[in-house]
Image: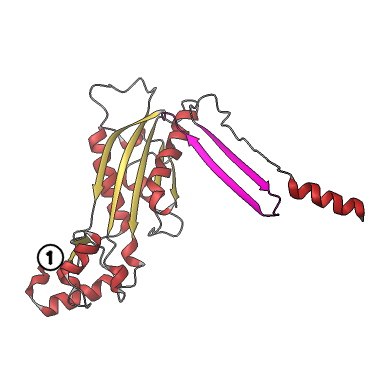
Amino acid sequence: MKFFLASIAILSAGVSAFSISKPNNNNNSASSSRITTITRTTAASRTTTTTSLSASGGGMSVRPIGIGSASPQTLITNVDLESVHDTSDEWIRSRTGIQERRVLVHEGTRSVITATTDDDDEGGTIDAEIDETLRTLGIEAARNALDMARTDPADIDLVICATSSPDDLFGDAPSIAHAVGCDSARVVAFDLTAACSGFLFGIVTASQFLGNGGGSARKALVLGADALTRWVDWEDRNSCILFGDGAGAMVLSSSDDDDDDDESDGI
């Protein structure tokens, strides 16, 4: 018993530290990371734990050579929302900076479209008959990026679509790749979900394929596309004012791709 009490006293007065380093051992990358956890026990028996995460990044072995975007034709302004909510253009703009948003036509947005059209003739900016989907927006953005990059779709090795609201439960990237003319026997296509940071994760993921693939992948098409208005509660004025729909795309090329002309290609 005395030995047990003496041990407790020694531990209460002592300080212990535990450190874990997890460096990046990839010799091809200049990036590194370190996680350190320190636990201190004071004489007053109060334990505090501090965890710090630090990371340093290096250059990615890819470069953007083309970008493109697409947005729905249907426009809903702050004034349009006044027809269905107790709100105003000034209230929305002063709190969010938003004046208008492009949206796909669906059950949620159609309630605003109908109310605006019935209210007055200023609803001419909204066309309820437009047939657009997230997939069609992705296709348009991808084609615009490929045109800017002057890249044949058949030369694309990888297609990544970063989205949290795909049309297809199993992902939109394969159908977008097929629609723009990618070689189905060559291209790898998949969706990636990382919410607001999805496009950034898509670029990083593509760079890993292009930079570490042993030359098997030379060009990638990365898209960021979302139709969050389909998930918004259009009866809630605090959230429905915030979101629109759209798609953006970027063509990436491996930095060591000798087939590219540095003076003519690139952004």
Q: Quadrant of the C terminus?
A: top left
Which residue position is annotated with label 1? 125
- Assign the magenta stretch its main secondary structure: strand
Which of these two is toward me, 88 or 255?
88
Q: Position of residue 49 (x, y in %)?
A: 62, 49
- 226 with respect to 57 (left or right): left
Judging from the image, the colouring scheme is secondary structure
Which residue range is magenta in the image?
A: 32-60
**At which x and y percent is residue 19?**
65, 38
Q: Quadrant of the N terminus?
A: bottom right
Residue 43 belongs to magenta span: yes
Secondary structure of residue under mark 1? helix
Q: Residue furthest top?
A: 258
Q: Residue furthest left?
A: 121
Front one among 216 and 99: 99
Q: Residue 82 appears at what percent x and percent y?
A: 18, 74
Residue count near mark 1 (Cα–Cα under 10 Å), binned few <14, some 14–19, many ≥20 = some
Left or right placement of residue 13 versus residue 85 in this view: right
Residue 84 visible? The answer is yes
Which residue is drawn at the image coordinates 62% and 35% (left, top)? 21
Q: Is residue 166 magenta?
A: no
Q: Position of residue 93 (x, y in %)?
A: 19, 63
Q: Residue at x 49, y 36 (%)?
A: 55
Q: Can residue 131 be spotted in the picture?
A: no
Q: Count of labels shown?
A: 1
Image vertical order of residue 71 relative to residue 24, above or below: below
Q: Quadrant of residue 120?
A: bottom left
Name the residue type under label 1. Thr
Residue shown at 39% from the left, 59% from the top: 165
Judge from the rendering whether residue 122 lies leftward or rightward of residue 157; answer left or right: left
Residue at position x 36%, y 42% from top?
Answer: 222
